[in-house]
Image (tube, rainbow, N blue to C red):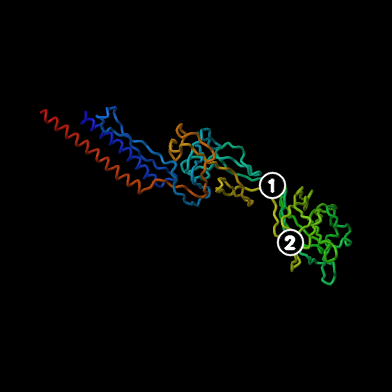
Amino acid sequence: MGLFGALNTAVNGLQSQSYAMQNISGNIANSQTIAYKAIGTSFSDLLLAQPASQQIAGGVIANSVSTNSVQGAITSASVSTYMAVNGDGYFAVEQPTTTNSSGPVYNSSPMYTRRGDFQMDQYGYLVNGAGYTLEGIPIDPSTNAPIGNAVEPLRFNNAFLPATATTTITYGANLPSLPQTASYSAATPGSELLDSTSFTADPTVAGTGKVEGQDVTTFLNQSLDGGSVTAYDSSGQPVNTQLRWAKTDSASSGGTDTWEMFYQTDSSATGTQPAWQNAGVDFTFDATGKLNPSVSAVPLNGVTVNGTPLGNISFDIGSLTQFAATNGAVTVTSLNQDGYPPGQLQSMSISNSGRVTGSFTNGKNIDLAEIPLYSFASPDNLQALSGGAYAVTGDSGAALVGASGKIVGASLEGSNADIASQFTQLIVTQQAYSANTRVITTANQMSQDLLNVIR
């Protein structure tokens, strides 16, 4: 039994070392494969049930050892839609079950991968180099929030961003304590102020004052340019929205430093002739140049410019001060609005917060989708599939959304197979394989000797 047992054990050893050699060969072959996880080999002995005094060394069996939880090196890439996972986590992906005239059809269970070389295919899906389609959650561009929590294959082909009407204008400026308007004269006290008596209708009545017709020229001479911003109506039509400031009272004249803001609108007489509407708030400043009382927002109702209705707009005040200015002009520090025209998707990138961001022809950068990462209780027990994908098994546990790892945009994770380590194992495996062949040779010689005794 011992001699022939040795032959069987040696053959068993050859099979196990061949198994290890196959794993080493695969690791070396995939040393440059994106996000490849090396497969090691562990050996377990096989023993027959024997009394303690009669135990013998048994055979051997080889088992695979996965390294799914071992991080590969992350390197930057020139493709903006490439992504890598730094730490724990897997992307959810799918493969199409069939393809029809409108593109691939997906109705299978998701698989998981760390291979992140995703690029847009001809149908608008993000597909990696192994043919797996990325899954994620679409984002509502108006709220910047995910639409539900169910993942689906992400498709961005011909993505179009509809126009958004301007609803808020944010403004910050410094108003000169001595406004040098076209009507200002250093020799004439109070000439820097708006003279309400020179107008057909008093424009200083906050909220109702309006300058139009023949009074427009007088108003322009007695006020200062407050800047302009391009606003948009609901269809994305651009509208040049202009502002002007007029000082109506001064502390140097015994009163309170008071300003009125006007915005350009249409004349009530002609409908399209430019006019200037009082915004409806008295802006008063104390001796330190600060607004007192403070004003945070001014509602502008029914704004119409050049025949284009903008509707109701909130004019949000940021930093508004009154300090001395050598040029006597308004210094605008911020002037922005929240509307934009329609736009077509130009390019995409991956943010470090795990979102697909689209760059549109209207200059807007909008989040289009959120990419969740999944974790497993035992990732090394996932079933490996071709192309660096994995399927859930009973031993791996279910996929849990919210892995601790982070997505790194424009980057790729490399293979975790170390060439130096693999070559070392290659030498050890070869020596073990050769030793097993010597056992067979020796056992064969012993059996020949036994036959010669019988002869």
**Sequence order check, earlier mark of 2 and 1:** 1
Look at label 1 and name its amino acid.
Thr
Are the residues flagged by discs 2 and 1 in contact, CB closer than 8 Å?
Answer: no
Q: From the top left corner, tell me how far across and down residue 387 is, in percent.
A: 44, 40
255, above or below 380, in the image: below
- How many other residues sit within 10 Å of disc 1, few (<14), some (14-19) or many (≥20)? some
133, above or below 75, in the image: above
112, above or below 86, in the image: above
Disc 2/disc 1 C-alpha distance (Å): 30 Å
Q: Element under label 2?
A: strand
Which residue is label 2 attached to? 174
- Of the 4 image quadrants, the one containing the N terminus is top left
Question: Which image quadrant for residue 433?
Answer: top left
Q: From the top left corner, tell me how far across and down residue 323 is, in percent.
A: 75, 64
Residue drawn at the location 72% of the way across and 48% of the way down:
167
Look at label 2 and name its amino acid.
Asn
Q: Nearer the viewer, residue 106 or 141?
A: 141
Which residue is label 1 attached to? 164
- Of the 4 image quadrants, the one containing the C terminus is top left
Numbered badge on residue 16: none
